[in-house]
Image (cartoon, rainbow, N blue to C red):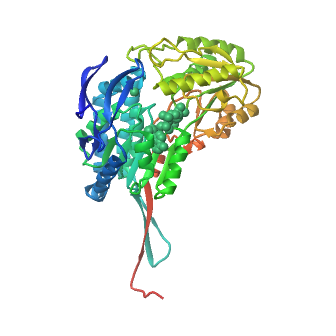
Amino acid sequence: MSGLSVKLKTPHTGEYEQPTGLFINNEWVKGVDGKTFEVINPATEEVITSVHEATEKDVDIAVQAARKAFNGPWRTETPENRGKLLVNLANLFEKNVDILAAVESLDNGKAITMAKGDVGAAVGCLRYYGGWADKIEGKVVDTNHETFNYIRKEPIGVCGQIIPWNFPLLMWAWKIGPAIAAGNVVVLKTAEQTPLSALVAANLVKEAGFPPGVVNIISGFGKVAGAAISSHMDIDKVAFTGSTVVGRQIMKAAAGSNLKKVTLELGGKSPNIVFDDADIENAISWVNFGIYFNHGQCCCAGSRVYVQEGIYDKFLQRFKERAQQNAVGDPFHPETFQGPQVSQLQFDRIMSYIEHGKSAGATVETGGKRKGDKGYFIEPTIFSNVTEDMKIVQEEIFGPVCSVSKFKTKDEVIALGNNSTYGLAAAVHTTNLNTALEVANSIRAGTVWVNSYNTLHWQLPFGGFKESGIGRELGEAAIENYIQTKTVSIRLGDALFG
Ligand code: NAI
Ligand code: MG
């Protein structure tokens, strides 16, 4: 591959121009080392195209462009204009929903209706942070008569952002929105499994009117470009979403380099708790959505289902029937709910968890197999007869696989819910307000849903307790992660010192 774009086709939109270069300084460039890598369609296992790969040298170039923008015109850009740029970008996302969603489905495998939902949420997020740009305010603090103190909220600087493949466009927006609102500049690296939609979106950055160097988007591998970001001496902050293993490496790299600020959004093994008094049909719908949405590739997936003994048998039977109805297949079919897993590697990981569950003695209630013989499709899978120490109950599977266990009392299920090194999300299904609140307040997780699941919203903070992460995304909380506090203390009057 030699050019900086290719003509591709999606079944949804027909032909379009796919950028393949690195987006640095508002321009499309090749990597310094001239490397490229292949992009796979997970529904067909075929190569879609190749894109240019960023190595350490390209990260350097992108950081230099970002630093120049940060020290230059961006520094004095008004908050109002930063907000306008984000709103422009949101409007362009909205206008380009069809192509953005189609590219997302092509590259990631997610169902087209879901991909459109992701674009809608990206629009909401970018617009919301556009609104924040001119509402980040400092304070005056009175300490004594001779001093005037004010506290400024300043941007952190050059932010390295490393995103995963499960929500490529949405993570793009979650990262870029608050960073830009607060006045930072960005070098964002996409996941090597799903570079395409972010590059289409990069063209919109330019069209929205962002000055060169403010938003830079690069494709590349974690161990090369990702590691170069987390250990870079001129990146002031790194924000990461992905596995807990890599989260730890990023923190180490930050500590070993320039002590850049770190925020992490990592894995989960979230409990989804159903009490006897729940509206059972409603609970089943949310439990189904909680685990199978996005093919189970959600950090907050409700993968541990706990059902109270009085309704356990009935729940399990009906949940099984519900899971079997989920339409698994071609991402571009309008009725499809679940597409393929993102890659051969993820497919293999999930299948090995399923095999592990079987050999550990758990019962496969439904699923447990590959679907079809082409594409990384896996049947929605439910395990019962599990024990808490099984790997399938302890570890994040990141696929369409959950376990269902029986509990007796509220105290017991709170303890079970908290029996995890993770603490990203949880849900409780009940018609009793006291039960709902007691469970919500007792589960150590960053988000607790009551009688719902996965209803994230850009106005609501999202992030992890325990090993699920550091810092929060979305809401006002995300702004906090992209500003630093400066105290200016002014000695008043002409009184001599000492
Ligand atoms: P990963 O953590 O390796 O990849 C996520 C991002 O980190 C990608 O952009 C990757 O290029 C980058 N990365 C990888 N190694 C890096 C390094 N040493 N330094 C800097 N950046 C690096 O996750 P992977 O392998 O794609 O998936 C493995 C598991 O991680 C999944 O099965 C799932 O359990 C979890 N995961 C969690 C996500 C979440 O939303 N919290 C998203 C994706 C994966
Ligand atoms: Mg792909």
Along the horizontal axis of the image, is 297 left or right of 388?
Answer: left
Along the horizontal axis of the image, is 206 left or right of 463?
Answer: left
Q: Position of residue 321 (x, y in %)?
A: 60, 11
Please identify the quarter of the rendering in which residue 106 is found: top left
- Identified at 59% across, 14% down, the residue is 367
Q: Position of residue 392 (x, y in %)?
A: 65, 27
Q: Position of residue 117 (x, y in %)?
A: 40, 26
Q: Is residue 470 in view?
A: no
- Identified at 28% across, 37% down, the residue is 21
In this view of the protein, which residue sits in the foreground, 169 or 248?
A: 248
Q: Quadrant of ligand 2?
A: top left
Along the horizontal axis of the image, is 210 left or right of 231?
Answer: left
Relative to residue 322, is residue 208 depicted above or below?
A: below
In this view of the protein, which residue sits in the foreground, 30 or 62?
A: 30
In this view of the protein, which residue sits in the foreground, 96 or 80?
A: 96
Please identify the quarter of the rendering in which residue 46 is found: top left
Name the quarter where the N terminus is drawn.
Answer: top left
Q: Is residue 407 in view?
A: yes
